Image: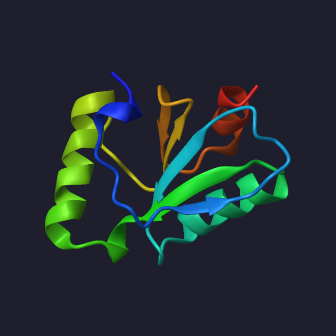
Amino acid sequence: MSLDQIKIPDNVVNVEGSRNRHKIFVATLSTCMWCKKGKEWLKENGYAYSYLDVDKIPLEEKNRLKAELHATFGVRPRFPFIVVDKLAVDSGYNPDIWEDMLK
């Protein structure tokens, strides 16, 4: 299963970066300290990525997205929830794991 099977809302933000070999999507919360650290880590390391602040979409859409992420990847979403190349995932801010995923 992959991210392609999930309907992602239209208000995704794209961040430019020189390291664009991987397609990176991060589901975040706008008020989450760890989500901010994750986005900062990606930007500081030059990665191009897209993100969605899940707390800024309607409740029904947020619940559907979280359920689909769980069903698709078998991991209960904690934020930040990163998907690399539509397949590899990690739930939570783990820069060591993220670095391994992005090699």
Front in this rendered view, residue 89 or 50: 50
Quarter occupied by residue 37: bottom right
Which residue is painted at 38% across and 51% down in the image? 78
In the image, residue 8 sits, relative to residue 72, either above or below, namely: below
Residue 48 visible: yes
Q: Nearer the viewer, residue 30 or 37?
A: 30
- Looking at the image, residue 33 sits to the left or right of residue 21; the answer is left
Residue 60's x, y, as percent?
A: 14, 65
Please state which of residues 96 and 5 is positioned toward the viewer in this rendering.
Answer: 5
Q: Position of residue 4 (x, y in %)?
A: 37, 33
| Residue at point 75%, 32% (across, down) | 21
| As drawn, 55 above or below 71 | below
x, y percent for residue 86:
48, 31
Image point (53%, 58%), residue name: 51
In the image, residue 69 sits, relative to residue 9, either above or below, namely above
Say whether residue 74 is visible. no
Give the quarter of the image for residue 9.
bottom left
